[in-house]
Image: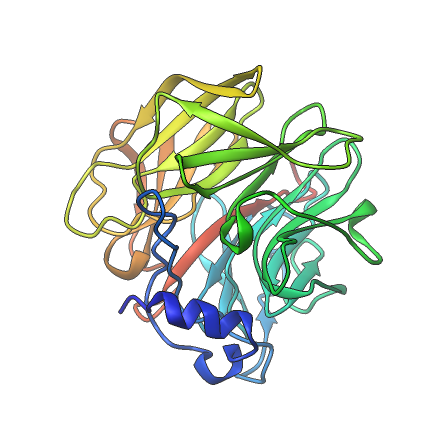
Amino acid sequence: MNTSTLIRYWLGTGAAAMLAGCGGSRSPIGAPGAMPQTSAIATRADRGTSWMRPGTSSGDLIYVAAAGESYALTYPQGKLVGTIDYGSADACSDSAGDVFLTVDQGVDEFSHGATTPSATLSVPGTSWGCAVDALSGNLAVTFFGKSGDDVAVFADAQGQPTLYDSGFGPWGESASYDDAGNLFVDGVSESGIGLAELPQGGGSFSSVSVSPPIATHVGRLQWDGTYLTLESGVGLQRQPNLLTINRLSISDSIATVVSTTTFRNIRRDALWSWIYDNAIIVPFGRESRNVGYWKYPDGGKPEKILKAPAGKTAIIEAVTISVGSSR
């Protein structure tokens, strides 16, 4: 089921524990002026035992942020080799293989192959999206705050964060750094879907418009090595093949869509994907239980589909890749 905007408000005021483990995929940023929706974000309450299968930690792994529990899969085989005993809203990673899961009012850091966190960082609200700067190691986390601030930046992914106001109020969602250390977040303003940019070394965000406009349902922001990308068409349940990755060229506060990737064989609920190694990994299907691989930036037909790799009850919100030592 999809939960209401009111539930998202409850999550921001500390009621996440009451809703931990509930089902339902998030509805990402919608029409201009609409407030996003989300499934319940699980807390760190004990729900079982975290585990990782021995001998599987040297290769690349997919870390799966999901409702109730989170998971680790081998990449590209897609074999379930680990669980984390609480859910999360987003997953991001750095070049060293460290993984960050946004949970409760903070973010947990996991070393490659780990299912228990090596560090926990706190934000003053319910955390949502995350991104790591490849240049500095800084970690950005978007959150639903009780003040105007909605983005926390942790220098070198540790300590206390510096807080910023993106200009989207509490409804900013995804975050990404580019190759120059500039931080971008997406959100909804009166003029529609837009971006906000915090320049490297800067002290505040400025607005960035998207041209041509993207009207509804945006998801993951990610740097693909050449362009900042913005996922759109996510969370649509009855309109197939609408997932699109938009590559953006940014100049003079305008993000121009220069090319797009579209996908075949996606039905219902495509959620937050991850671009890696000339491929894009997409959670999709009813309650986004499946994971598919497509060529990037080609798109088109899937290279491989994993049917419910984390189990038929897993409700996947986002994926990331943890790079293994064998690469």
Residue nearest the observer in this picture, 97 or 100: 100
Point out the image quarter for the C terminus: top right
Looking at the image, which residue is at 71% across and 23% down? 180
Q: Which residue is at 59% across, 37% downward?
A: 176
Tell me if residue 125 comes above or below residue 32 in the rendering.
Answer: below
Task: Find the residue positioned furthest to the right.
Answer: 159
Q: Quadrant of the N terminus?
A: bottom left
Name the residue located 29 percent from the left edge and 37 percent from the top edge. 243
For the image, the number of numbered tags is 0
The residue located at (39%, 26%) in the rendering is 246
Q: Which of 70 and 164 is in front in this view?
A: 164
- x then y, percent, for residue 199: 71, 28
- Compared to 227, does 39 lie above or below? below
**Toward the viewer: 258 or 55?**
258
Left or right of 317, for residue 200: right
Outermost residue, front direction? 190
Q: Does the image show residue 263?
A: yes
Q: Is residue 245 above or below residue 86?
A: above
Res 296 seen here: no
Q: Quadrant of residue 273?
A: top left
Q: x, y (%) of residue 49? A: 57, 81
Q: Position of residue 321 (x, y in %)?
A: 56, 45
Q: In this view, does 285 lie to the left or right of 125?
A: left
